[in-house]
Structure formats: structure tokens, C-alpha cells
Image (spheres, helix red, strand yellow):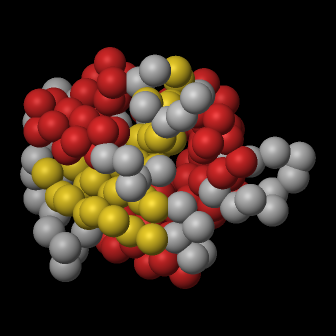
Amino acid sequence: MVSIALLTVSDTRNTKNDESGNYLLQEAENSGHKILARVICKDDIYLIRKYVSNWISDQNINVIITTGGTGITGRDVTPEAIRPLLDKEIDGFGETFRFLSFKKIGTSTLQSRCIAGTANGKFIFVLPGSQDAVMTGWQDIISYQLNENTKPCNLVNLIEKLKK
């Protein structure tokens, strides 16, 4: 079990119509993880950084997952907000996500700027906002990496090593 903080980045979502955030909440809990925080914030680079920075410094949180704001329009700033906060990027996450997404939506996946990395001993995943993209990210990648039984390796087994 890991402790997770969820951030939905959107100018239009609330807890009732945040399908992607609601999906992540439900799936994470169904997988035995604990949701310690959930916030919906506007597409504002400084608000995004504020929430994620606070969670990065919270010793009770192991994983931060964001959804939304990864496209290429002017309001999509989540990768720009998160990237400077990372100690290391996990390049394979975005590569794997786009590979899996390509099978479903073809070349439209090039518009996805999802990223992942580590900061202060935490794993951070930045997902697109669509529910299909969040399902791909969770079902095909994140859920396996947050399961200590995934072999030959998983991220759960690295949490303590990140802190050293």
C-alpha cells in the first residue's frame, strides 16, 4: 500500500464531473492504496506548483498523480509546472504511455506531454485529462508499478531507496 495525492488540473471540473479524478480515486482505493489528498485546481502554473510542492514535502505521501493540462494549448501548463520540481525524470513512463496510447488513438498520441519523475523520495505521474488516457496510464502502467508483486521490478520497492 502506498499513500497517494491526486491533483486534477482543470478550469471546468468539480468533484461531481471529474471523471478522471474519480476513476483514479476509485481504482487506487480498490488496489489497497490510501488517498491522503485530492484537489482540483485551475490551469495555473503557480497553483499547480503550490499543491505539488506541498505534497512533495509531506512525509506521509509516497506518490503524486496529476491529471489534466498536458495538451498543447495555451492553458496546458502541467508539465511546465511539474518538471522544475523533479529531482529525476522517468523518461520511460512517457515513452511507454505514448506507445500504448498509439495502439488506441494513433498519431493523436503525439499531443500527449505526460511525464513522470521523482522528487524528495516521491514518485510523480503527470497524466492527460481524458478518462481514456487516465485509464491507460493507471491500468497499463501505474497500477503495476505500485504493486510490490510486479516482477522483475516495481517502484514500490524503490520508495525507501529514494529517501536515502
**Residue at 48%, 77% in the rendered image:** 29
Which of 18 and 73 lies nearest the eye of the viewer?
Answer: 18
The quarter of the displayed image where residue 47 is located? top left
Q: Can residue 107 be seen here?
A: no
Quarter of the image with the N terminus is: bottom right
**Residue at 74%, 59% in the rendered image:** 148
Q: Is residue 59 above or below residue 49?
A: below
Q: Can residue 24 be seen here?
A: yes
Relative image position of residue 100 (x, y in whole percent): 67, 46
Q: Is residue 88 above or below residue 59?
A: above
Q: Is residue 104 above or below residue 86?
A: below
The quarter of the displayed image where residue 153 is located? top right
Which of 3 and 15 lies nearest the eye of the viewer?
Answer: 3
Q: Is residue 152 above or below residue 144?
A: above
Q: Horizontally, is 24 left or right of 144 in the view?
A: left
Relative image position of residue 62 (x, y in whole percent): 47, 50
User: Looking at the image, which residue sits at the far right?
Assistant: 152
**Residue at 28%, 63% in the rendered image:** 37
